[in-house]
Image (tube, grey):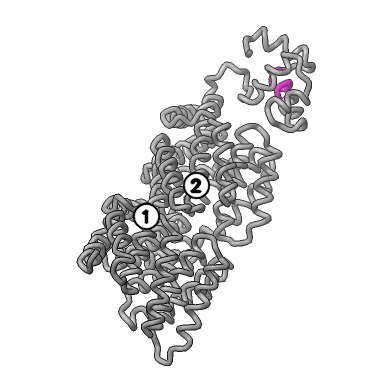
């Protein structure tokens, strides 16, 4: 191997041909003396291939070479990046140690340097994890100022993304999104290094999610996809890219595509051992399976998400509700809200909380969730959070007999979802509109809206929602019984006890008792024998 081979490896890195670059530089390593900057490029190639330990090893060696050569600032930067990647990989001990080493080297510098700005980023991210968004935004802003002073594009993009994220989480959504957009412009111009680019791409899209801004998320996900496709060897960041694509496919109603993207996300993330992306991919699979009525598959997916460190709520609670176990659903959503103090994180749980509480007949609790959601949504001038809040408030007002107040909110929500081409959310809003029309006595309009919602659910394959819409449309021949009540009736007819039925359907005995009581009331019978006779006579089984 010669110096020319090293130069070839560096050229391959610049072209994003990570596998060939890694091979070339690895082959040269040991044959010719690699400089610290060469080792940094070898580390980058290893990272982009999803090989974290190789990355750390090469960066440690580069750090030592820089130190031996008297370049303490370059050594500090190697220590910073090593620490950051270890922290992101869930290794706080080693990560904090390397950040501490970088800090010690920079503190020994007598003149201002750009590395001081880099070392503000761990503090900013720690503030974010602690919910101290005001301090985090200030610290990230200081890092951005340092980046501008020294003309460092990597630090500037990272600091803008961090600052924008803090503002979004603090409720200053318009300001935050402007900084996130600016960070993305830095990246898409190609002036930012590969690892920093990937971090900004994924971080900005995550910020759009927190801002409830699917249009921006769609735009930047398309940009991330193009970036990934230009680097076919790349493993790093591709798992998260497929997660974002799965989220958008789910919103668009392309549920089969969403499942496929989530499976790809899990596969790519597993290669790089990116646990957070693995967890998100599993949770997304659970969501789609739940909406399609594949409850066993949903159960398994939520379990895998939990095992990878992702709270499986509110999806798991909504699954329990769909299975007819309202008590378990209520307990789960109350538990997660009791544990969640960050307003930005609570927002993701509140619409499900209202839905579950309404199903359980607790209108006051549902109204409380809607009130909290409204309070947060009032600060959102963009995005769809206000639409979600309006739809939630409309559902609560319907349950409280306030259809006149509910209908305008629900119709506004329907228009927004239709404009966004979000068919499932639009169908849910339309179904509520139909219920409101029925409450106000306009049965013709109600039938029209419910029928349209039913057709939309059928096209999506949303089996549980189809059953509900058909029941509202009066098309079922089940005497008003829900799917769960029919299951319970079948087991009653077989002579099963309440305990046996609970075991068969994975419900509590109290829930079984309630289903039996409701079934008897709907059928107009008073005993199990009478219910059995009625069921056979009317061919309900």
In this rendering, the answer to whether 468 lies above or below 312 is above
In this rendering, the answer to whether 468 lies above or below 398 is above
Q: Secondary structure at mark 2?
A: helix
Q: Quadrant of the N terminus?
A: bottom left
In this rendering, the answer to whether 508 lies above or below 521 is below
Residue occupying the point 29% across, 50% down: 232
Tell me the magenta residue range: 518-523
Q: Does 522 appear in magenta? A: yes
Front one among 536 and 293: 293
Residue occupying the point 61% across, 24% down: 483
Residue 289 in the image: x percent, y percent? Answer: 51, 35
Q: Are marks 2 and 1 in contact (CB under 8 Å)?
A: no
- Relative to 156, is 351 on the left or the right? right
Disc 2 designates what residue? 409
Q: What label does residue 49 carry, if any?
A: 1
Front one among 148 and 468: 148
Q: Quadrant of residue 110?
A: bottom left
């Amino acid at each position: 191997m010669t110096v020319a081979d090293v130069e070839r490896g560096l050229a391959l890195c610049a072209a994003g041909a990570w596998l060939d670059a890694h091979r070339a530089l690895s082959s040269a390593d040991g044959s010719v003396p690699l400089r610290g900057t060469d080792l940094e490029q070898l580390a980058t190639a290893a990272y982009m291939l999803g090989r974290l330990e190789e990355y750390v090893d090469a960066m440690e060696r580069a750090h030592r070479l820089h130190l031996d050569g008297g370049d303490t600032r370059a050594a500090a930067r190697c220590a910073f990046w090593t620490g950051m990647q270890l922290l992101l990989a869930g290794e706080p001990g080693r990560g904090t140690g390397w950040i501490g080493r970088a800090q010690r080297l920079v503190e020994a510098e007598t003149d201002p340097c750009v590395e001081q700005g880099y070392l503000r980023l761990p503090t900013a991210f720690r503030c974010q994890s602690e919910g101290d968004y005001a301090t985090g935004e200030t610290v990230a802003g200081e890092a951005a100022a340092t980046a501008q002073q020294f003309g460092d594009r990597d630090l500037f993009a990272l600091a803008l993304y961090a600052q924008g994220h803090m503002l979004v989480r603090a409720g200053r959504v318009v300001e935050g999104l402007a900084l996130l957009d600016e960070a993305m412009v830095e990246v898409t111009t190609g002036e930012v290094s590969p690892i920093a680019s990937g971090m900004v791409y994924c971080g900005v899209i995550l910020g759009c999610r927190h801002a409830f801004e699917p249009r921006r998320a769609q735009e930047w996900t398309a940009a991330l996809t193009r970036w990934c496709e230009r680097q076919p060897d790349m493993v790093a960041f591709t798992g998260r890219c497929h997660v974002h694509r799965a989220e958008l496919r789910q919103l668009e109603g392309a549920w089969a595509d969403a499942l496929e993207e989530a499976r790809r996300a899990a596969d790519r993330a597993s290669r790089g051992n990116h646990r957070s992306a693995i967890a998100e991919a599993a949770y997304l699979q659970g969501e789609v399976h739940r909406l399609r009525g594949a409850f066993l598959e949903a159960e398994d997916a939520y379990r895998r998400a939990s095992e990878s460190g992702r709270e499986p709520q509110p999806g798991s609670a909504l699954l329990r509700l769909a299975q007819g176990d309202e008590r378990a659903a209520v307990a789960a959503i109350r538990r997660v809200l009791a544990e969640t103090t960050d307003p930005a994180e609570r927002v993701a749980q509140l619409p499900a909380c209202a839905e579950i509480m309404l199903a359980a007949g607790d209108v006051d609790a549902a109204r409380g969730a809607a009130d909290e959601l409204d309070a947060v949504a009032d600060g959102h001038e963009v995005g769809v959070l206000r639409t979600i809040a309006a739809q939630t408030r409309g559902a609560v007002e319907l349950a409280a007999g306030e259809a006149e107040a509910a209908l305008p909110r629900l119709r506004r929500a329907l228009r927004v979802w239709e404009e966004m081409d979000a068919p499932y959310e639009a169908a849910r809003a339309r179904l509520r509109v139909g219920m409101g029309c029925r409450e106000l006595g306009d049965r013709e309009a109600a039938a029209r809206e419910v029928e349209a919602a039913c057709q939309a659910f059928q096209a999506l394959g949303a089996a549980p929602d189809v059953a509900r819409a058909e029941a509202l449309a009066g098309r079922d021949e089940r005497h008003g019984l829900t799917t769960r009540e029919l299951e319970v009736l079948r087991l009653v007819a077989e002579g099963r006890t309440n305990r046996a039925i609970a075991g068969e359907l994975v419900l509590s005995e109290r829930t079984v008792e309630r289903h039996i009581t409701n079934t008897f009331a709907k059928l107009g019978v008073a005993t199990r024998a009478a219910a059995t006779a009625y069921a056979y006579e009317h061919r309900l089984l």
